[in-house]
Image (cartoon, rainbow, N blue to C red):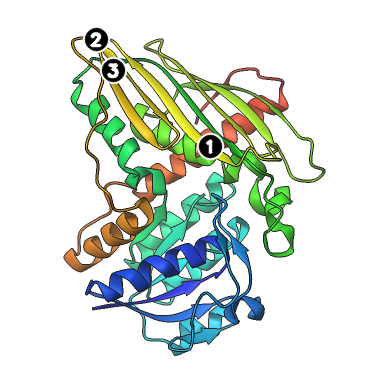
Amino acid sequence: MLRVGIIGFGGMGQVHFDRYRRLVTEGYPIKLVSICDIDEAKLRGTDAVGDVGAAVKPGQHDLSSYSLYTDMDDMLKNEQLDFVDIALPTYLHAEASIKAMEAGFHVLCEKPMALDSRQCQEMIAASQRTGRTLMIAHCLRFWPEYEYLKAAVDDGRYGRVTSAYLFRGGFTPRWSYQNWLLQKDKSGGCLFDQHIHDIDTINWILGKPDKVSTVASNVIEGSGYDMVSTNYIYSDGKVVNAQDDWTLNGDFGFQMEFRVNFERGNMVYRDGKLKVNPESGPGFEPELPKEDAYTREIKYFVSRLIAGEPIEIAPPTSSADTIKIAEAEVESAKRGGVPVRVE
């Protein structure tokens, strides 16, 4: 039985809370012990909105059976835990993860890993130094439709990838604690907070590109880039582009999609459905796991801890490479789209 504490009880912290609670009721070998958030109102049950727009209503969560803290240091000192789930604002990821590992706890940390690659290396070094496991919760690596795409690329069932397009976009995130999401120095803007999902998907499935060429725009003062379009340049010539925009307000809602072309077919994920279109036969919608990605990533992390095995699906070194790609995109955007080599 692994004991866990959640640090950060905003939108994603509450998403993870719901999954832990469900896993406990299903008899999974895990026990949620404590919750920490600097905003005491959240611990009383306030409104929160997740990054896909799912509202959490006041009083929805009964927290009476958990130890509650407003100070992370107090929780780490007083609770006997096996790991912590860090769902804090991005600018706190590195500091909190390192502190938790040095206190003896394994760490599951929300994406993105950090705001720069230097912090990522410090997190990796802390994991190696302490012998504590670190995993970044890149949920798309556990999203069934993206897993299916990954498998098809890896086994070459439709030949090599010739082109790919990914899109993600929706409403402006004006709901975060003290508006941290719209502060560039705390979230990194749309590019680091939302577009990072597709950067990581490209890194995970297609590999780290040689160069990137990015055009981006900022319309919300102080928020960093709000709209971004990046071309990923590979030596084999495949055409890859990803776009993101978090200024799509009104009734737009939220959308994420991809279209990937292979030598002998293509795949399209749109409106929550994956369609496979092989050239040799009729198109079809594959059978996919029903369990959601957030649950699956938590179960994967816990299973690796129990087995004493390293993280393979989302190792921190790969998450750090995703940040390197994001940094190159920022540099390219600053220079008006000039191709920038990914380090």
* Circle 1 residue: 255
Vertical placement of 45 versus 67: above or below?
above
Q: The disc labelled 2 sits on which kind of residue?
A: Glu
* Circle 3 residue: 277
Q: Which badge, 1 or 2, is on the more N-terminal residue? A: 1
Q: Which badge, 3 or 1, is on the more N-terminal residue? A: 1
How far is disc 3 from disc 1 in space, using C-alphas? Answer: 21 Å
Residue at the extreme right: 221
Picture coordinates of residue 77 (x, y %)? 47, 86
Q: Quadrant of residue 82?
A: bottom left
- The disc placed on residue 203 is none
Label 2 Cα crowd, 10 Å radius (few <14 / some 14-19 / many 20+): few
Vertical placement of 293 versus 131: above or below?
above
- The disc placed on residue 279 is 2
Q: Is 229 situated left or right of 235 in this image?
A: right
Q: The disc labelled 3 sits on which kind of residue?
A: Asn
Picture coordinates of residue 3 (x, y %)? 32, 79
Label 3 Cα crowd, 10 Å radius (few <14 / some 14-19 / many 20+): some
Picture coordinates of residue 69 (x, y %)? 55, 84
Vertical placement of 145 versus 111: above or below?
above
How far is disc 3 from disc 2 in space, using C-alphas? Answer: 6 Å
